[in-house]
Amino acid sequence: LHHFPFLDDSLKLKTHNRLYPPKLYKGVCWQDNLNLFYLGMQDQFHTFNMFDAQAWYVRDLIMKKIKIPSIEVIKKDIIDWVNREEKLEDPLQMIDFQTDYTVDLCNEIDYPKIDFEIIRKHFYQWEHDKIEDIINYRNKSFSSAVTGSVAPIHHTNWLEAMDDSMDTFMKTKL
């Protein structure tokens, strides 16, 4: 739930959980006050890399590496993304949407090279795994979108992994 009791009502994001909240240009810049930024407000497939790209984008806005377009361009961009989101029918389309959104942000900044197509494929597999086995889908391993290295399978089934200490986490599966 989005809750901002410290903000004046005119600045508050009021939306349900969705992939592209209205009134946020590029998903981060408040349409009614272009000096206010919201990060991570989207329902998420891409978490850390999307948040990271959002932070880089906002950094570049603040540093004036990126120029804010006219209000007309901002409104059209928001409407286009919101309309596209509202037509989504299934999780694969949602994955494509958020991948495209994150790539769109990265195309405007000097974000390090990351293979968003492999991330898209991983999310497709993740969705398939959830449908196939909702209890054990979290026990899978995927390759890095940066290095290509495949992560080892965690040594403990996620349902039984109650010790999140560094020592326990870093143990390798026997």
Image: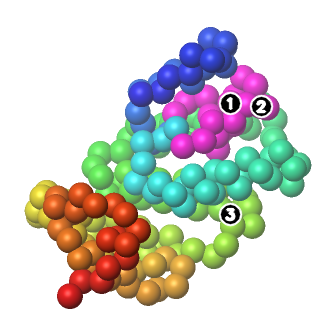
User: Mark 2 highlights which residue?
Assistant: 34
Q: Residue at x 81, y 41 (%)?
A: 68
Q: Are marks 2 and 1 in contact (CB under 8 Å)?
A: yes
Question: In front: mark 3 or mark 2?
Answer: 2
**Nearer the observer, disc 3 or disc 1?**
1
Identified by mark 2, the residue type is Leu
Amino acid type at mark 3: Asn
Q: Is residue 128 visible?
A: no
Mark carried by residue 30: 1
Q: Quadrant of the C terminus?
A: bottom left
Which of the 4 image quarters holds residue 130?
bottom left
Q: CA distance from mark 2 to mark 1?
A: 5 Å
Amino acid marked by disc 1: Trp
Classify mark 3: residues with Cα within 10 Å, few (<14), some (14-19) or many (20+).
Answer: few
* Image height of 11 relative to 61, above or below: above
Q: Nearer the viewer, residue 34 or 78?
A: 34
Q: CA distance from mark 3 to mark 2?
A: 20 Å
Give the labeled residue for mark 3.
107
